[in-house]
């Protein structure tokens, strides 16, 4: 018990210290933390794009294994500021539960992860929150509320609509994220994101 908790605390502290963002110049950086398809592949994670704008880290989509690949890339999942979903195909969302968990535990967050998406994102996030609801209690009991504050559990849906044109999702501190409709028939809604940071 005591040894396991001590090792867990050290692991969390080490993971929180890991931050490849500090090695990057201030700018807009894009990386693939997953580029797989719906069928399993031993060497690919599901769709997941990491976007780094200055000190801020965001994900576009959250396929299976994407958040683990993010860690192998040198980025602490606790730094994930938000997730932007393009659509609700299973392979683009099936890693969302783990992403919410790793971000919560990896950053000792006191607020849930914002998950942006077109209409329907509320249902997706509510489903993952419900699926992980029992685990919330287990994690708090196991790691303690100082490491995993109960209020930081899960995600919070941030819906938008592109039915009448582009939607500004975020606009602050030199960062602007705009969602626009894309044709991914028969999937609707489906969106892409235009990200601008300090003119890039």
Image (cartoon, rainbow, N blue to C red):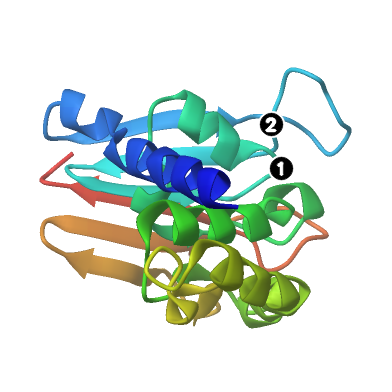
The residue that mark 1 highlights is: 64
- Please tell me which residue is depicted at 44% across the width and 82% down the height of the picture: 151
Among all residues in the image, which is located at the extreme top? Answer: 43
Q: Is mark 2 on a helix, strand or loop?
A: loop
Location of residue 69 in the rendering, given as x and y in whole percent from the top left corner: 56, 30
The residue that mark 2 highlights is: 45
Give the left or right position of residue 173, taking residue 154 as reference: left
Q: Residues within 10 Å of mark 1 (few under 14, many from 20)?
A: many
The one of 4 and 185 positioned closer to us in this rendering: 4
- Please tell me which residue is depicted at 80% across the width and 54% down the height of the picture: 90
The one of 144 and 14 positioned closer to us in this rendering: 144
Instruction: Say whether disc 2 or disc 1 marks the residue closer to the N-terminus.
Output: 2
Location of residue 94 in the rendering, given as x and y in whole percent from the top left corner: 74, 53
Q: What element carries label 1?
A: loop
Among all residues in the image, which is located at the extreme front? Answer: 2
Confirm whether residue 85 shows in the render.
no
Q: In which quarter of the image is residue 75?
A: top left
Q: In this view, does 16 lie above or below 169?
A: above
Give the left or right position of residue 76, taking residue 72 as reference: left
């Amino acid at each position: 018990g005591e040894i396991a908790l001590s090792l867990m605390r050290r692991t969390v502290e080490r993971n929180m210290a890991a931050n490849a963002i500090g090695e990057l110049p201030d700018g807009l950086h894009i990386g693939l933390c997953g580029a797989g398809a719906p069928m399993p592949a031993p060497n690919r994670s599901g769709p997941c794009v990491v976007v780094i704008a200055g000190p801020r880290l965001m994900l576009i989509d959250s396929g299976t294994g994407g958040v683990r690949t993010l860690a192998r890339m040198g980025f602490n999942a606790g730094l994930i500021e938000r997730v932007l979903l393009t659509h609700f195909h299973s392979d683009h969302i099936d890693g969302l539960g783990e992403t919410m968990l790793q971000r919560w535990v990896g950053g000792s967050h006191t607020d849930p992860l914002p998950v942006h998406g077109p209409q329907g994102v509320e249902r997706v996030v509510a489903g993952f929150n419900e699926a992980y609801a029992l685990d919330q209690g287990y994690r708090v009991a196991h790691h303690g509320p100082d490491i995993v504050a109960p209020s930081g559990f899960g995600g919070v849906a941030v819906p938008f609509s592109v039915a009448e044109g582009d939607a500004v999702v975020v606009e602050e501190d030199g960062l602007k994220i705009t969602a626009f409709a894309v044709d991914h028939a028969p999937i609707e809604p489906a969106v892409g994101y235009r990200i601008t940071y300090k003119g890039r």
